[in-house]
Image (tube, rainbow, N blue to C red):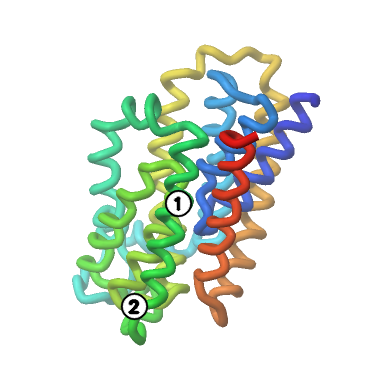
Amino acid sequence: MSENMIAIIIGIVEGLTEFLPISSTGHMILVGSLLGFEGEKASVFQVFIQLGAILSVFILYRDKFLAMLRPRRINIYGNGLTALHVLAGIVPVMGVAFFLHSPIKSYLFSPYTVIIGLVAGAVLMLVAEKTAKRPVTCDVDRMTIKQAFWVGLFQLLSLWPGFSRSGSTIAGGLFLGMSRKAAAEFSFIIAVPLMLVACLYDLLKIWNKLSMDDIVMFAIGFFVAFITAYISIVWFLRFLNNSTLASFAYYRFVIAGVSYYYFFMR
């Protein structure tokens, strides 16, 4: 299979799964293994195309990001989303990821660990749906700093590949009295600075391993990830208006079972 076709396939996988509660990292590890696209170049490519997904969120929520830059009085009880909310949501995971980055990359990026994460994340989402009460925060602009911080703590689970960053944060939001849509939107918004820092950190360390011949492949992956992520986010928010996370949890069980059979039982 040509590299450009691999770029299209993985770009679609990244764009479709990055903001759905099914784990983009887990899917890219599994698909990369299936396609035989592994190693340093694959790692750089997978990090780079995440920037395309990030761009889609920034365009969709550009008004909120611009509003955060305007000076205003901060109300900790919820009166518009602010930069402080975003910081509260990303500082916990950034701090832990900084110290555990190397062991996570070394020991947790494998089909077996992804399968564990897929199952554990599915259970978390089902428990959140089962125990969630009537939401008290139905708009992301009404969430509190305290809610943002606790959602950020749930995001720590996503450091295990397969758990899903959006899955853990949305489930956390449900536990904290947020509606599915409000939790999802906050998950998307805090993903921008978090993923941007993580991507740039990874790219700076391994960028010198690329050559000019890789530009076309990387550009294709970036563009495909951007388009598919944009479509995925718009669809997902509409889906959450009338549906729960249960279908995504069951999908994760199926993918985990199929992956286990393919990698360990054939």
Q: Is residue 190 visible?
A: yes
Question: What residue is rendered at 50% in x and 58% in y?
Answer: 21
Of the two numbered discs 2 and 1 on the same chain, state the one appearing first in sequence. 2
Residue 71 drawn at (x, y percent): 28, 62
| Badge 2 amino acid | Thr
Residue 83 drawn at (x, y percent): 30, 57
Residue 184 drawn at (x, y percent): 45, 66
> At numbered mark 2, what does the secondary structure look like: helix, strand or loop?
helix
Q: Quadrant of residue 135?
A: bottom left
Question: What residue is rendered at 67% in x and 36% in y?
Answer: 221
| Pair 2/1: label in front | 2
**Tag 2: Cα neighbours inside 10 Å, few (<14), some, or many (≥20)?**
few
Q: Quadrant of residue 242?
A: bottom right
Alpha carbon separation for disc pair 2 and 1 = 20 Å
- Above or below: residue 131 compared with residue 7: below
> At numbered mark 1, what does the secondary structure look like: helix, strand or loop?
loop
- Above or below: residue 91 compared with residue 213: below
Q: Which mark is residue 131?
A: 2
Q: Which mark is residue 5?
A: none
* Residue in front for this viewpoint, 59 or 204: 204
| Badge 1 amino acid | Ser
Residue 210 drawn at (x, y percent): 58, 15
Tell whether 135 sits left or right of 51. Answer: left
Tell whether 135 sits left or right of 58. Answer: left
* Residue in front for this viewpoint, 60 or 161: 161
Count every numbered label the image shows and give the total: 2
Q: Is residue 66 visible?
A: no
Q: Quadrant of residue 137?
A: bottom left
Residue position marked by numbered label 1 in the rendering:
164
* Residue in front for this viewpoint, 61 or 167: 167
Question: What residue is rendered at 51% in x and 13% in y?
Answer: 208
